[in-house]
Amino acid sequence: MLNKKGFTIIELLVVLAIVGIIITLAVSSMANTIPHLRLNDSVGELVSRINLARSAAIARNKTYVISFNKLENTYNIFMDDNENWQRDDDEDTITDRQMTKGVSIVKVSFSFGTTAFGYDGSGLPLKNRIGSVCLKNDKDEYHKISVSWNGRAKVYKNVKKKECE
């Protein structure tokens, strides 16, 4: 009589095939999820920094500007003592930030055709500049951040591409 202990080669191959299929599905799913997470993270971070600039403007009763550069895919936030909308050497900087890999600034549209807005000491938009900035990821998902007349930043997720062109 044969004593059967263990698995046959066929049983092992079937198990390996099933594990391989599961791993393939998991990797494929992760490849689609990572760009989405990067976009959400970038939008969340930008809104947090915008809120920080607003809070700093109120706390210090100073002017703060948020300026975007689409070509370099960056934004910076600084105290603008002389209200020239430019960061001067003697002005404090809150942040000078490159966007996360795979996330791009695709549209910046604030009042008077500018790529910057700011807050005065009361936390309201400086010189009534309001508008929005659109970010996109490698999978062509678009999120939009709008700054309203009361100075609040609001996020619109998964907007249509034409809203950001």
Image (cartoon, rainbow, N blue to C red):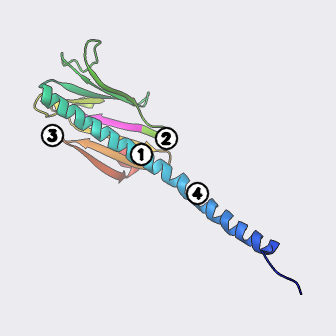
Q: Which residues are magenta?
A: 105-111
Q: Of the residues shown, which amino acid type is indicated by label 1?
A: Leu
Kindly identify which numbered label has been placed on residue 78.
none
N-terminal of the pair, mark 2 or mark 3, is 2
Q: Of the residues shown, which amino acid type is indicated by label 2?
A: Gly
115 is higher (above) or lower (below) than 89: below
N-terminal of the pair, mark 1 or mark 3, is 1
Q: Residues within 10 Å of mark 1 (few under 14, many from 20)?
A: many
Residue at the spot of label 4: 28
Residue at the spot of label 2: 102
N-terminal of the pair, mark 3 or mark 4, is 4
CA gap between label 3 and label 4 equals: 43 Å
Work out which residue is located at the far bottom of the displayed protein and give it: 1
| Residue located at (36% from left, 47% from top) | 143
Residue at the spot of label 3: 149
CA gap between label 1 and label 3 equals: 25 Å
Front residue of this view, candidates 52 and 85: 52
N-terminal of the pair, mark 4 or mark 2, is 4
**Magenta span: chief secondary structure:** strand
Magenta stretch: includes residue 110: yes
N-terminal of the pair, mark 1 or mark 4, is 4
Q: Residues within 10 Å of mark 2 (few under 14, many from 20)?
A: some
